Image (cartoon, grey):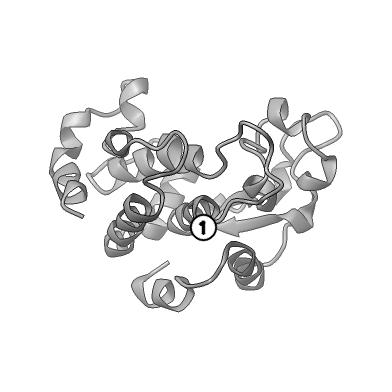
């Protein structure tokens, strides 16, 4: 997602943005899980730099994991309840959830924020500080958004402003590396970016 597209969609609500992405990329050809609770391989589009997001993540967390998926309606795993997105679009989806979570969300689930703070932002911190993945599928996803750092900064600023009172949100958690825990990256490489983010 480049800056022109972000300016087009930034005022959309969550479900309208999900519909927008379905129109942009199409709907998967199959449901997320097989009957044995393995991810359906043929729905992957990482060759195009795209990942999948569950529309019902405004109701429940971590629906891409069998443990949490089994606790929720199987219909939430249907192809029509999935959307393709790049990493920046994925971050925007999670911000939109935080800004307006479903009134029917699962009790004690702080929907939206965990995906943003624990996964997407730490990964993008590494990417925009020079990290290159040894996994070709992942690097495809990074290369799709590498030239759109301006959008990333706007999204982090938006999250800091609109989600600061959200359950489990702590600003310090924005300034983290994802890959350091796996000894693939040094958080010190991200310090210049963290200084930029702190000024937002």
User: Residue 146 is drawn in which quadrant?
Assistant: bottom left
User: Which x, y percent locates residue 88?
Assistant: 43, 57
Label 1: which secondary element: helix
Q: Which residue is mark 1?
A: 96
Answer above or below: position of 173 versus 89. above
The residue sitting at 27% across, 34% down in the picture is 172
Q: What is the residue that sits farthest to the right in this orientation?
A: 35
Which residue occupies the foreground of this view, 175 or 4?
175
99 left or right, relative to 2: right
Answer above or below: position of 54 versus 1. above
Which residue occupies the foreground of this view, 156 or 170?
170
- Number of numbered markers: 1
Quadrant holding the N terminus: bottom left
Answer above or below: position of 163 versus 80. above
The residue sitting at 48% across, 59% down in the picture is 89
133 left or right, relative to 14: left
Which residue occupies the foreground of this view, 182 or 159?
159
The residue sitting at 22% across, 30% down in the picture is 187
Answer above or below: position of 175 versus 7. above
User: Residue 171 is drawn in which quadrant?
Assistant: top left
Quadrant holding the C terminus: bottom left
121 left or right, relative to 21: left
User: Residue 176 is drawn in which quadrant?
Assistant: top left
User: Which x, y percent locates residue 70?
Assistant: 78, 30
User: Which x, y percent locates residue 16?
Assistant: 62, 70
Question: Mark 1: few, some, or many residues within 10 Å (few <14, many ≥20)?
Answer: many
């Amino acid at each position: 997602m480049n800056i022109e597209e972000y300016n087009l969609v930034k005022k959309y609500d969550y479900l309208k943005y999900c519909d927008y992405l379905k129109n942009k990329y199409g709907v998967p050809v199959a449901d997320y899980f097989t009957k044995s609770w393995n991810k359906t391989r043929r729905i992957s589009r990482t060759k195009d730099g795209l990942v999948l997001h569950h529309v019902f993540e405004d109701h429940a967390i971590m629906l891409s994991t069998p443990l949490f998926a089994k606790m929720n309606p199987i219909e939430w795993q249907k192809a029509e309840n999935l959307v393709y997105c790049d990493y920046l679009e994925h971050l925007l989806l999670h911000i939109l959830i935080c800004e307006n979570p479903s009134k029917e969300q699962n009790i004690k689930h702080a929907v939206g924020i965990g995906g943003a703070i624990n996964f997407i932002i730490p990964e993008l911190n590494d990417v925009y500080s020079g990290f290159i993945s040894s996994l070709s599928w992942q690097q495809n996803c990074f290369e799709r958004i590498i030239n759109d750092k301006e959008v990333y900064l706007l999204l982090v600023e938006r999250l800091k402003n609109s989600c600061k009172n959200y359950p489990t949100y702590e600003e310090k958690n924005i300034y983290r590396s994802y890959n350091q825990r796996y000894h693939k990256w040094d958080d010190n490489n991200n310090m210049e970016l963290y200084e930029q983010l702190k000024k937002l």
